Amino acid sequence: MTNESNHELLMRAFGPAKAECEAAMLEVLETMFFELPEDEAVLLDSPPEEAVAATALFGGDMQGSLCVAAGPWAARRLAASFLGREDESTITEAEVRLVACEMTNMVCGNALSRIEPHGSFRIDTPEIGPPGIARRSWLTFPLEAGAVAMYLNLAE
């Protein structure tokens, strides 16, 4: 797949919000998790395997949901970075889930404020659950320890 066709697929899946979603994820990864993707984001038809996923519903000027899903190794590493731990083995599963919810909340808020800078939003507390529907297109960021992906669903 060429970069051009990947870009076209991303635009079709995320529409004009693609750039804002990508920028939101990159900013949250860098500033809160001290992590930079190993390569550019790609569009995949499913989230990482065995992903730890959290979904946030939002309302206000726009309504919909945003899901963030990370592969198990990536989720553990991101949790360790966020919590300031050098040893990933000290991270509990409960901490991995809590950090996944917090990451989803941060990415959702960041993305919404980029998509609609003067909008008013309410973001529900993210919930852990299966990442969901395989037919959706996931904006996926390859990391050193796996991948993290996101899906934005704007209600019409």
Image (cartoon, rainbow, N blue to C red):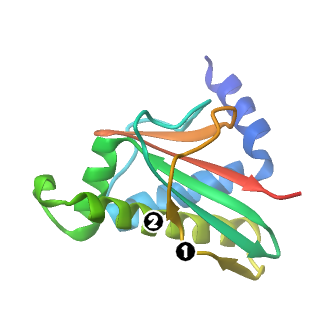
The amino acid marked with disc number 1 is Thr
Residue 142 appears left or right of 55: left
Looking at the image, which is closer to me, 36 or 131? 131
Looking at the image, which is closer to me, 132 or 104? 132
Instruction: Name which residue lies at 68% across and 80% down.
Output: 122
Residue indicated by mark 1: 125
Q: Is residue 72 above or below residue 5?
A: below
The amino acid marked with disc number 2 is Cys
> What is the x, y in percent for residue 62?
80, 69
Q: Of the residues under marks 1 and 2, which one precedes in the sequence?
A: 2
Pointer 1 local density, CA inside 10 Å: few below 14, some 14–19, many at least 20: some
- Quadrant showing the N terminus: top right
Residue 36, numbered circle: none
> What is the x, y in percent for residue 132?
60, 43
Residue 101, numbered circle: 2
Tag 2's secondary structure?
Answer: helix
Of all residues, the one furthest to the right in this rendering is 156
Tag 1's secondary structure?
Answer: loop
Pointer 2 local density, CA inside 10 Å: few below 14, some 14–19, many at least 20: many
Looking at the image, which is closer to me, 18 or 65? 65
Instruction: Name which residue lies at 57% across and 33% down.
Output: 46
Mark 1 near mark 2, Cβ–Cβ under 8 Å?
yes
Q: Is residue 138 above or below residue 102?
A: above
Of all residues, the one furthest to the front in this rendering is 129
Instruction: Name which residue lies at 78% across and 79% down.
Output: 119
Dividing the picture into quarters, in which one does residue 55 lie? bottom right
